[in-house]
Image (cartoon, rainbow, N blue to C red):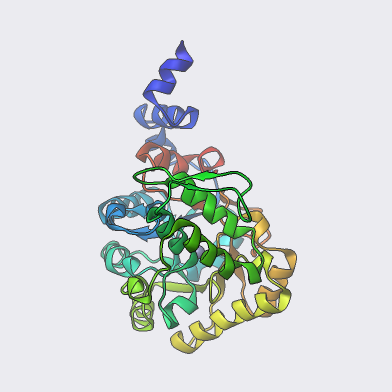
Amino acid sequence: MERQLIRRLFPSGKKHFLASILDYSGANRLLRHWDSWSGLLVLNYHRIGDPLECEFDRNLFSASQETLEKQVRTFQSSCDLISADDLETVLKAPRGKHVLLTFDDGYRDNYDHAFPVLKACGASALFFIASGYVDNPRVAWWSEIAWMIRNAQVSIIPAGKWFDKPLPIAQGYPTQAIGQAVRKYWTLQDNETEIYLSDLSQITGAPRCTKSQAENLWMSWEIIQEMHQASMRFGGHTVNHPILAQLSAARQREEITGCRDRLTEKLGVAPLSFCYPVGQAHMFTSGTKQILKEAGYRFAFSFYGNYCKVSHKDWLDIPRCAIEYALPEVILNSRLTIPQVFAKN
Ligand SMILES: [Zn+2]
């Protein structure tokens, strides 16, 4: 009976229930002033703005501009919001509640919507750029998959070469089908990815995306330079955003150093931070880390949840957790006071 009531009041489960108690009881406010944890909590954003205006994957939106501003002010009042320039000091610090904000992929909306907020709040953030999309703007593979599924002329993708079971495409917004089709891409070898996209276009009856659909989708180098001048920091995210573990060592090196060289050329300083595309634990290997080390990277960020405890030694696998569009405020507040529980993805 109690369980049913909790489920009805807090549909996202026990964590939401616990977070609500912590928040409404005032415990979160109290804990903000206590050393309830020490280390570095790295939060990750993708797109900022209104997902309903997006023709690609709406799940990539992390916050509206208004929500982002509110969140940044909360981080500043409850933790020590740091810049990427402080990373080494913070990772060596014996105590402190440090928070670092990161934005992945180099979306133009980060400049339009996040940059003004960060400037107004006097905050810095670390932006990870996939340089190939800045140099040659086009729709990225994950967005193209979402677009083809959303514009499918069929209601089901039959089982066959790519899927063991038929994949139904729900009317309206087919989140599940998009998720499954993207996850399939993650498993593909380098030489299969283009064939997969082309087959998906044929099966769905949706044409491939055009270059004009990428207009204003990505930051330009001029924008990146302007943001860098204004104390924003930039890190590498490969050239083409492949799943690194699926590539040969030589191809991984190309992707990692190619991006590093473009950032160095455009910003006049070599990037020290890198973030693994998609960033799940199986998407990079010890070989990937070795290539990063040789390429001069000191910090690399993954994306499977959690925070960095004081004792964290592996600077080439710094955990991050996601900020999602529908993330309840009580969960975010609780994450800042007890990341041991609330920073798990
Ligand atoms: Zn990415």
Q: Position of residue 5 (x, y in %)?
A: 41, 16
Q: Position of residue 29 (x, y in %)?
A: 37, 37
Q: What residue lies at 58% left-to-right and 51% top-to-bottom?
A: 304
Left or right: residue 246 compared with residue 303: right
Report which quarter residue 293 is drawn in.
Answer: bottom right
Choose between 123 and 19: the one closer to the eye.
19
Position of residue 56 relative to residue 228, above or below, is above
Q: What residue lies at 43% left-to-right and 81% top-to-bottom?
A: 136
Report which quarter residue 146 is drawn in.
Answer: bottom left
Position of residue 10 relative to residue 176, above or below, is above
Choose between 90 and 54: the one closer to the eye.
54
Count of numbered marks: 0
Choose between 232 and 290: the one closer to the eye.
290
Q: Position of residue 252 (x, y in %)?
A: 66, 74
Position of residue 32 relative to residue 294, above or below, is above
Choose between 297 and 28: the one closer to the eye.
297
Asked if residue 318 shows in the view, the reply is no
Q: What residue lies at 58% left-to-right and 68% top-to-bottom?
A: 195
Asked if residue 129 shows in the view, the reply is yes
Left or right: residue 218 compared with residue 43: left
Left or right: residue 212 compared with residue 81: left
